[in-house]
Image: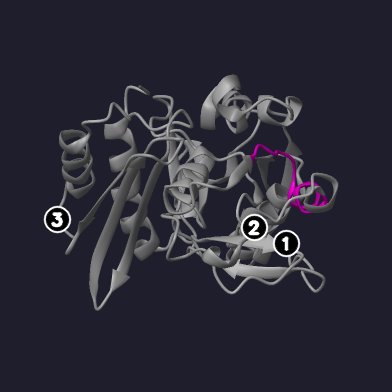
Amino acid sequence: MTDKVIIGSRKSKLAMAQTKLVIASLKELFPTTQFEIKNVITEGDRNQQASLAKIGGKGVFVKEIEEELKNCTIDFAVHSLKDVMPVLPDELTLGAFPKRVSPFDCLVSRQEFASLDALPHGARIGTNSLRRQGQLLNVRPDLKIIPIRGNIDTRLKKIDTENLAGVVLAEAGLDRLSIDLSSYHQLSLKDIIVPAVGQGCLAIECRKADERVRKMLDQINDPQSAKCIHIEREFMRELGGSCNFPIGGHAYLQDQQIVFDGLIASPNGEHLIKEVAVPANKPGVGKVVADQLLAKDNFGIIEGD
């Protein structure tokens, strides 16, 4: 009898592409296992108009999928890690973090810009992310941030329909979908915007009690990515991270040691506080950096003042 595993995934092109990448990795290791995808529609998919902060923050892309896990109608789920809340339901866990790809953002535009400074005064930039908004406005307070949502193709089209100078997108999504950008120009924002916690990394969520699936997922877990991700998620938990105020957190290997950048900002960009921990190998560094930022928050960023 063929072993069968059911994977929960959103129906978007990116979600399906990411789920198929995970399945391809598992098929190499478990060739006799049958993998089946079950599409789940989330609140974030149903409501494409309102901002994420208004409809529930990051969890709007995972709650319905987590219910399927708790009801045992799927065996595991593939998420973009940046969509996963810092605290999971008690009976669920993150069983694997495949090797991370680029965590950085980029500006995609019709016109080529050598740098962010080269954008014209008052340029209209499309993004629905308060994290991106706060950091962009901190550097260029004259920019006009235009809230946009939808899949990558939809957001690219809005460059023309909304008269935008460009849209800010995650490099990982562009790469995983092999988006044709031949008629666009791409500007890296690596040195401008601290990434979202978990950006560029997939998270595979499963039931804690499901030993069979957990052992399977352990085979595709990347220990280095997992170590960095645990720092970032601890940081986000300490700050109560959601989409209600800009948070950036990025742990990475540099010169054989882990470095962690943590950031909070006001949505209007007027206030921005950043801390860098080097080395960040010790347990609890995410909490330490979060505490340092909280101690420096004289502007009421966390309270939303």
Residue to which mark 3 is pinned: 282
Residue 70 appears anywhere in the view: no
Residue type for callout 2: Gly
Residue 172 appears anywhere in the view: yes
Residue type for callout 3: Lys
Q: Identify the residue at image location x=59%, y=29%.
A: 52
- The reply to whether dot 2 and dot 1 touch (C-beta < 8 Å) is yes
Q: Earlier in the sequence, mark 3 or mark 2?
A: 2
State how far apart marks 3 and 2 are (Cα).
Answer: 31 Å
Residue 177 is labelled as 1
Provide residue 242's location: percent of width, then percent of height.
44, 31
> Does residue 40 lie above or below 2 as drawn?
above
State how far apart marks 2 and 1 are (Cα).
Answer: 6 Å
Provide residue 80's location: percent of width, then percent of height.
56, 47
Residue toward you, 174 or 70: 174
Q: Find out whether residue 179 is within the magenta segment.
A: no
State how far apart marks 1 and 3 are (Cα).
Answer: 36 Å
Residues in magenta? 146-157
Q: Identify the residue at image location x=37%, y=40%.
A: 265
